[in-house]
Image (cartoon, rainbow, N blue to C red):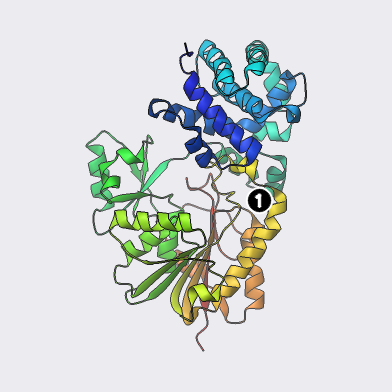
Amino acid sequence: MTESGADSRAAAVRAVAAVLGHGVMLEAALEAAAAAPSDRAFAQALAFGALRFGHRLRRVAVQLLPRPWDDQKPAVQALLLVGLYQLEYAGTAPHAAVSATVAAARMVGATGAAGLINACLRRYQREREALLAGADETQAGRWSHPDWFAEQLMRDWPDHWERILEANNAHPPLTLRARRGRISRDSLAAELAETGMVTHAVSFATDALDLEVPTDIRSLPAFVAGRCSVQDAAAQLAAPLLAAGPGMRVLDACAAPGGKTGHLLELVPGLSELVAVDIDAQRARRIRDNLARLGLTADVRIGDAANPQVIGEALYDRILLDAPCSGTGVIRRHPDIKWLRRPRELPGLAARQRDLLQALWRHLKPGGRLVYATCSVLRAENMAVVQGFLRETADAVDVTNSASLALTGLPPLPEPRGPGLVLLPGYAGTDGFYYACLERRAT
């Protein structure tokens, strides 16, 4: 007979082990873990929590293990993180946390480690304060982030790094975007209120609503019917900063999964053309699916936006470059980034960002505007890329400050100390995001 709750623990452990051992992204790992519908929500909560606080919990575990952490199989590492997360953060009854996690060990093929898991979790209950104090003596334990990332933030944001790390460990809100042309933000809020959902309007994003209590988006009739989308409020600033107008030709580069594409079409239904490009065919399919749900259409192309054969010879009035990046601004939504991202990847990402920016600039009309965006909080991917581009490009002008005047209601934000607009986690209730608005001088 299966221990009650063991199935959901086992699914969470499989997902976390896939992240730790094979570098799989958490969302894909959870899909592959194949939890039953009744177990899915709890398994997801356990997996997200175990990775969110895992760097602290790992420092606890190393004090409990007879052999080094790196000598343990990924399944054993995952069992310890999931078990310790339940005892410290999830409010799970201790008996249930221990017994169901030990049972999960047998279900994930780690039967030989069941005794070890049981002993470690029970010892944690007895020695909790001393073990946590030992973990918190380390930087990674105190902030539950990898050392390299905390140290990089200290260099990039010496006055803000602690607040960023704290915000990264918080649960993010579920933010909706009302689909203009079908429903107003106030009407969407009223519709949700009829079902008992409390929402809060975001002052600086005119279509954004934060749900006080997150829910399964697939259960919302407004989402299914295409009256709203899920999009963080920071990401909802891309379309207004682009300031497209009727009759314009717009290029949305690196567009998947299509949230900003949809928002552009909602804001300016009279565009002459919108071309959405993504290098990944599967992700490009998500652009089409999201647009279909919203009742919108665009010219979706698969390919490298830096490849002239993909873009052709066309010139555009507006270009949005949502550049591939480290994702360090969305850690609160994707805690697996703490485990998957490596500092050695940053130079390659910055080089790719520079290449895309230079390639797409050739497709911008004189007098047109390009918005460079990332969901990174690292200067190497943001201000440094744009500063270098401005130095090398005689006809490029930074107009971010004037463009930002259209964003009323923004709270005070940290000074970027360079070109662009930066939203850091913990300051405006949003994910971390960077924008630079660049215009091409008319000849």
The image position of residue 126, as x and y in percent, is: 65, 10
Q: Image point 61% across, 41% down: which residue?
A: 165
Question: In this rendering, is residue 371 above or below 177?
Answer: below
**In this rendering, position of residue 57 left or right of residue 428:** right
Residue 252 in view: yes
The image position of residue 424, as x and y in percent, is: 55, 50
Q: Image point 47% across, 18% down: which residue?
A: 5
From the viewer's side, name the closer residue of 249 and 5.
5
The image position of residue 196, as x and y in percent, is: 26, 33
Residue lying furthest right in this view? 67
Quadrant position of residue 135: top right
From the viewer's side, name the closer residue of 254 and 60.
254
Q: Image point 58% across, 53% down: which residue?
A: 376
Q: Disc 1 marks which amino acid?
A: Trp
Residue lying furthest bottom in this view? 443
Question: In this rendering, is residue 333 above or below 360?
Answer: above
Q: Image point 35% across, 43% down: which residue?
A: 200
Quadrant position of residue 379: bottom right
Q: How many other residues sit within 10 Å of disc 1, few (<14), some (14-19) or many (≥20)?
A: many
> Which residue matches tag 1?
157
**In this rendering, position of residue 29 left or right of residue 343:** left
Exactly how many numbered labels are in the figure? 1
Question: In this rendering, is residue 153 above or below 92?
Answer: below
Q: Secondary structure at mark 1?
A: loop
The image position of residue 42, as x and y in percent, is: 45, 27
Residue 406 in view: no
